[in-house]
């Protein structure tokens, strides 16, 4: 089955700097790659996703890139703010009825 | 607010007991997913229902069962509880199996 590896497990950046979180997946049939942000005491919140027919997607300060050949995808956050501090999870799935397989998460701390 | 609701928010019980967790999906969503989040295992998929029918099964123990009712709300039943079942249990919903999943706030289960 699918296996998703996520790095780093913790990341500290200065406010205003960029943050990059990387994930690799094992199932070449996976074609949907969402990213979730989880704040303390809350459920995971979908922040951006990408499908395999696209190499990059951007939404304001957040972007995701996908390299299907290398089977890895990354989350980029620019101009980080203290409210970006949270745990971020990547995930992968095939289309259809296969549920999400999550990475172990990255705890991002943005230092003011 | 994702539109997915879960009750109760917290649950404290003893080993050997049985509990029921409830989830109401977003309006119009047909698919419900259950996930378990523990510190050492991350987010693990348990089971998925689509319009009342079981669609996919993950790492769900035989002591656990679920169902989705005609009004599309879902219940996760956990029986013969063990200390290791203590975790956060999340429900997510999507319009179809191939669409974005939105998570509820979770139920924190503590087994003493």
Image (cartoon, helix red, strand yellow):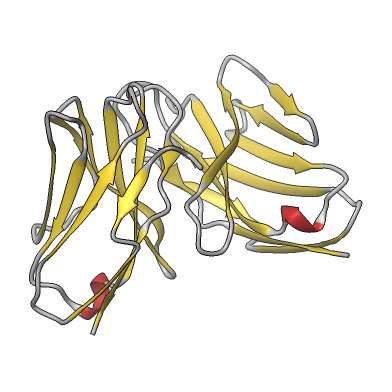
Q: How many marks?
A: 0
Q: Position of residue B24 (x, y in %)?
A: 28, 40
Tell which of B58 and B27 is nearer to you: B27
Q: Residue at x 32, y 51 (%)?
A: B6
- Classify A78 as above or below B30: below
Q: Residue at x 69, y 40 (%)?
A: A75
Q: Position of residue B91 (x, y in %)?
A: 33, 46
Q: Residue at x 48, y 24 (%)?
A: A31
In the visual, does A98 lie left or right of A94? left
The quadrant of the rendering that contains the N terminus of chain A is top left
- Classify A21 as above or below B108: above
Q: Position of residue A36 (x, y in %)?
A: 56, 44
Q: Position of residue A80 (x, y in %)?
A: 83, 50
In the visual, does A109 lie left or right of B61? right
The quadrant of the rendering that contains the C terminus of chain A is bottom right
Tell which of B27 and A11 is nearer to you: B27
In the visual, does A55 lie left or right of A18? left
Q: Residue at x 57, y 33 (%)?
A: A71
């Amino acid at each position: 089955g699918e296996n998703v590896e996520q790095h780093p497990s913790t990341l500290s950046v200065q406010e205003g700097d960029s943050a990059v979180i990387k994930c690799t997946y094992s199932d070449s049939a996976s074609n949907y790659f969402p990213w979730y942000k989880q704040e303390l005491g809350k459920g995971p919140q979908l922040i951006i996703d990408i499908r395999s027919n696209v190499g990059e997607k951007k939404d304001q300060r957040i972007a995701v890139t996908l390299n299907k050949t290398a089977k890895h995808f990354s989350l980029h956050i620019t101009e980080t703010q203290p409210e970006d501090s949270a745990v971020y999870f990547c995930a992968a799935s095939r289309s259809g009825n296969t549920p999400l397989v999550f990475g172990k998460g990255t705890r991002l701390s943005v230092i003011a | 607010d994702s539109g997915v609701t879960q009750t109760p928010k917290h649950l404290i019980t003893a080993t050997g007991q049985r509990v029921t967790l409830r989830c109401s999906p977003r309006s119009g969503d047909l698919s419900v997913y259950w996930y378990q989040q523990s510190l050492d295992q991350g987010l693990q998929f348990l089971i998925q229902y689509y319009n009342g029918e079981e669609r996919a099964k993950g790492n769900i123990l035989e002591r656990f069962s679920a169902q989705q009712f005609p009004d599309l709300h879902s219940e996760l039943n956990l029986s013969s509880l063990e200390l290791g079942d203590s975790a956060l249990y999340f429900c997510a919903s999507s319009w179809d199996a191939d669409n974005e999943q939105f998570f509820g706030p979770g139920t924190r289960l503590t087994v003493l």
